[in-house]
Amino acid sequence: GATLGVLGGGQLGRMFVHAAQAMGYFTAVLDEDAASPAGLVSHHHIRTGYEDPQGLATLARACAAVTTEFENVPAAALDTLARSLPVSPAGSAVAIAQDRAREKAHFVQCGVPVAPHAVIETAAQLAAVPADLLPGILKTARMGYDGKGQVRVATPAELAGAWEQLGRVPCVLEKMLPLAHECSVIVARGRDGTVVHLPVQRNLHRDGILAVTEVYEGNLPPAQTSQALVAAKSVADGLNYVGVLCVEFFVLQDGTLVVNEIAPRPHNSGHYSQNACDVSQFELQVRCMTGLPLVQPRLHSPAIMLNLLGDLWFTGDQPVAPTPPAWDAVLALPGCHLHLYGKVEAKRGRKMGHLNITGATPEAVRATALQAAALLGIAPF
Ligand code: ATP
Ligand code: MG
Ligand code: MG
């Protein structure tokens, strides 16, 4: 079999490796961490950083195609690899996803509504921010995830203080919007421009981190669902994207759909597809990078995903010895599928695994998910 490569060794890389192996491929993971979740399960583990030319050359020699699981991989590394083998997504698309300012400009170009915002790169731009963008959220243009690199600000003085606090790096100030729901769409786009999608996911975030994803008929108002699918496709087409892309949206209280951001890879909100769809987001990633046919996935079960954060491994306040939750009671419930990432150390807020729950009806899956959440100490939703 051919070898497929992935830049990054986190949980997304690990689940990509599992999907690739199931389809008969060998895998190669590039990640400097000796205990990376993907490196631990891969045939080859190249233990260098993304900028190391030798590591990239080794990966290129070993592989038939390469993808990424980490959105902040240097776009230049993807460009370098693309000189010798197919790389999806392309460095040019990843570069846009890595920069909130460029990302917003792309959404506007695609005709998809975005939150009112201003780019702040200089003191003059800071001073010129229109008052109606406040209260807002100041976000670093680069490198933020799980709500990190974001400060909520209500006044011009707070805004100035927040920009100082973030180190005066390029930022985007977004108006704070009155959200009714959050949702996301996973699309997969092939080299020939074929686009398929997973059903629209309804997401609940807590403290800036995804907590719960619910997917079933009626999880969102139908008008927003169809708008989200059209918008996600136009964002992918506009990037001439090849690979799996997640597009995150806000649904405002007045029903308006606004695009939030994109992730150029499979996404936490698409994990339910492993157990609830006939093609998972990781199989889509394999199919995209190898040029295998893309068929429209079908949701065969209503599903809820609960994120298992490191907090669940602690029995009290830090410092205490981490203990894994007792899975027995949870796995005694119907339709519970446990996914753990093999991370060596539990930390608060760290993604350790997820629980996919499938059921015959939305009511049944919700009842089971609420029972599982109660057993695990996850707040009800
Ligand atoms: P991710 O881990 O998804 O990449 P991130 O750090 O890039 O997260 P965002 O998606 O920008 O963060 O924001 C995190 C969460 O904060 C959103 O899912 C939403 O709940 C809230 N949020 C962000 N921007 C706004 C806004 N303009 N108005 C209201 N809420 C917002
Ligand atoms: Mg983000
Ligand atoms: Mg987000």
Image (cartoon, rainbow, N blue to C red):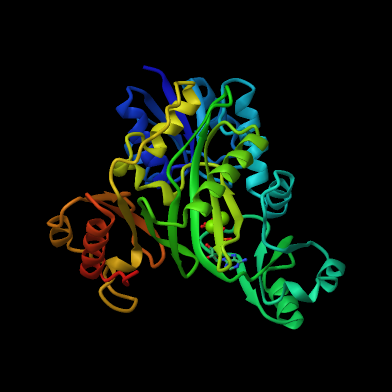
Which residue reaches farthest top?
Answer: 1
Q: Quadrant of residue 173?
A: bottom right
Displayed-image quarter of ligand 1? bottom right
Looking at the picture, tell me which residue is in the foreground, 81 or 380. Answer: 380
Q: x and y percent of residue 124 in the render?
A: 87, 68
In this rendering, the answer to whether 332 lies above or below 131 is: above
Question: Is 353 left or right of 139, judged from the image as shown?
Answer: left
Q: x and y percent of residue 215 in the render?
A: 37, 52
Which residue reaches farthest front?
Answer: 223
In this rendering, the answer to whether 171 lies above or below 354 is: below
Looking at the picture, tell me which residue is in the foreground, 28 or 233. Answer: 233
In this rendering, the answer to whether 256 lies above or below 186 is: below
Q: Quadrant of the C terminus?
A: bottom left
Query: Residue drawn at (41%, 38%), measured in percent from left and top?
Result: 281
Question: Is 36 left or right of 234, judged from the image as shown?
Answer: left
Q: Quadrant of residue 323?
A: bottom left
Question: Is 312 left or right of 31, judged from the image as shown?
Answer: left
Q: x and y percent of residue 125 in the render?
A: 84, 66
